[in-house]
Amino acid sequence: MALQQQMTQPSQLVGQLGQDYATQLTGLTSVPLDTSQFAPTVAAQDPLQTQAASLAGQGVGSYEPYLSQAGAYGTQAGATMGGVSPYITGAAGLTGTGAGTGAGSIASYMSPYQQQVIDTSLAEFDRQAAMRQQGISDQAVALGGYGGGREGVMQSEYQLGSDRNRALLQAQMQQQAFGQGADLKQQDYSNLLGLGGAQAGLAQGQMGLGQYQQGLAQLAPQLGMGDIGMLSGMGGMQQQQTQNVLNAQQQAAQMAAMQPYQQLGTYGQGIQGLAGIMGGTTSTITPDPTALQTALGWTSVMGGLMNPSIGGSTYINTDNQGAPPDNSGGTIGNILNQLPGWGNANPTHQYPPFRAMTP
């Protein structure tokens, strides 16, 4: 039985291109791809970011000195406010009429030399009065009326006037002393209140300094964070720019490494497109039968001869004796004997009768 094989071959140009493509593909893929050339890279911290981190470390607890100073001012203010109370108490003791001679009385504010001044002034007044009175007597003597009633009247009127003037002088000096004492007492009262107010003002000033220090304690970290934020932002921009450059370099290296593969892929797609439009050659190959195929063919023929009843009853009479003695059909030996050079024509090639079946 003959075998047929149909084969479609590409055109000569496409075949040559395919061989070239296979050669290049083998050579390209046989070399390991160095992926380290385009491995991802992370940009290092920018110097501004490093400076920001340093400032952040230095700023931790930077407010503590200000808070400590604020606490010190608060303690001083408390002590100063404690000193206000004596002034308030002293001023409260100066309220009222100021009578008596004890502490806080008007008499306590009068000069300790006031009485001596009064006494000296009255003594001088008396001396001057005596001198004037003696003048009246001397005048009466000169007029010859000494010891008379007229002299007596003049002496009496002078004495009354002198006593009245002496009492008025004494009252004025005492009133002046009292007024000065009252003024001094009022001034002392005002002074005590003023000192108390000054003490309270000092305490408030110390409290203000404490609050100022507290404000500095809050402001210092805020200003520091502003600097840190600005440095971090600028450093981040610089780092991002550096990262962009590294990414671009990595992509460029990757593109350069993959370019031969992409180029070869484009080459292969082009060959595939050419194969579709340039066609090829179709051939049918019928190879010579092998010894096994020839034997199988003869077996098929002999089988048909040995079993003619299959597919229909066909009897071959090879012995010229009519129907075969049984229902098995003719024999291959009798058939061969009828061929030229075989059987009856050539007695030397006699085959014994045997039965053959055909499919």
Image (spheres, rainbow, N blue to C red):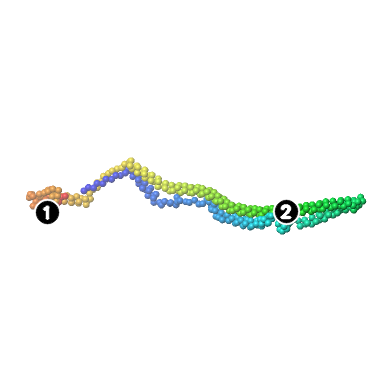
User: Label 1, on which residue?
Assistant: 352
Task: Give the x, y percent position of residue 148.
Answer: 90, 52
Is disc 2 placed on a helix, strand or loop?
helix
Q: Position of residue 170 (x, y in %)?
A: 79, 53
- Please report the residue visible at 26 percent of the width from the left and 46 percent of the height from the top: 5
Q: How many marks?
A: 2
Residue that protrudes farthest toward the left in the picture:
321
Q: Quadrant of residue 123?
A: bottom right
Furthest toward the front, the residue is 149
Secondary element type, mark 1: loop
Q: Nearer the viewer, residue 63 or 235?
A: 63
Q: Residues within 10 Å of mark 1 (few under 14, many from 20)?
A: few
Which quadrant of the figure has residue 71?
A: bottom right
Q: Is residue 190 visible?
A: yes
Q: In the picture provided, is 24 more to the left or to the right than 113?
A: left
Amino acid type shown at disc 2: Ala
Identify residue for label 2: 182
Are dots 1 and 2 in contact, CB under 8 Å? no
Query: For the residue marked with disc 1, what is the amino acid?
Result: Pro
Q: Earlier in the sequence, mark 1 or mark 2?
A: 2
The front one of 242 and 173 is: 173
Q: Residue at x 50, y 47 (%)?
A: 241
Q: Residue 87: percent from the left, percent from the top?
A: 67, 56
Given residues 7 and 181, the one toward you in this image is: 181
- Report the side of 20 relative to 238 (left or right): left
Could you give the CA–CA distance between mark 1 and mark 2, rounded to whole angstroms?
Answer: 183 Å
